[in-house]
Amino acid sequence: MCFSMSSFHHFEDPSRALLEMRRIVKPGGFVYVRDMKPGRFFKHGSRSEEFRSAVSRQLPGADFEEGSGYVSARFRV
């Protein structure tokens, strides 16, 4: 399993990072990426549409979840 928590918006190359996460996880394992959304207190983060688009390109079939302050994706390798 590979986790990325509240750091996706800091990745220099999100596509490359997602491919590397997928590469290092054994078959049957999970890649889980969760990031905060920009808001009142934290002005930076991942916008839902951009996050979903970036993740979907590299991890097709990922399951998404979204709350008031976060967006996440889970992908089985």
Image (cartoon, helix red, strand yellow):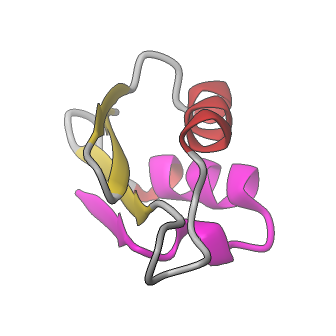
Front residue of 62/26: it is 62
Q: What's the residue at 52%, 30% (across, down)?
A: 59
6 relative to 20, above or below: below
Whether residue 5 appears in magenta in the rendering, the answer is yes
2 relative to 26, above or below: below
Magenta part of the chain: 1-22
Q: Position of residue 5 (x, y in %)?
A: 34, 72
52 relative to 35, above or below: above
Q: Position of residue 56 (x, y in %)?
A: 58, 26
The C terminus, quarter of image: top left
Q: Is residue 66 left or right of residue 59?
A: left
The N terminus, quarter of image: bottom left
Q: Is residue 49 left or right of residue 77?
A: right
Quarter occupied by residue 16: bottom right
Q: Position of residue 24 (x, y in %)?
A: 44, 58
Q: What's the residue at 33%, 34% (across, down)?
A: 75
Q: Residue furthest right?
A: 12
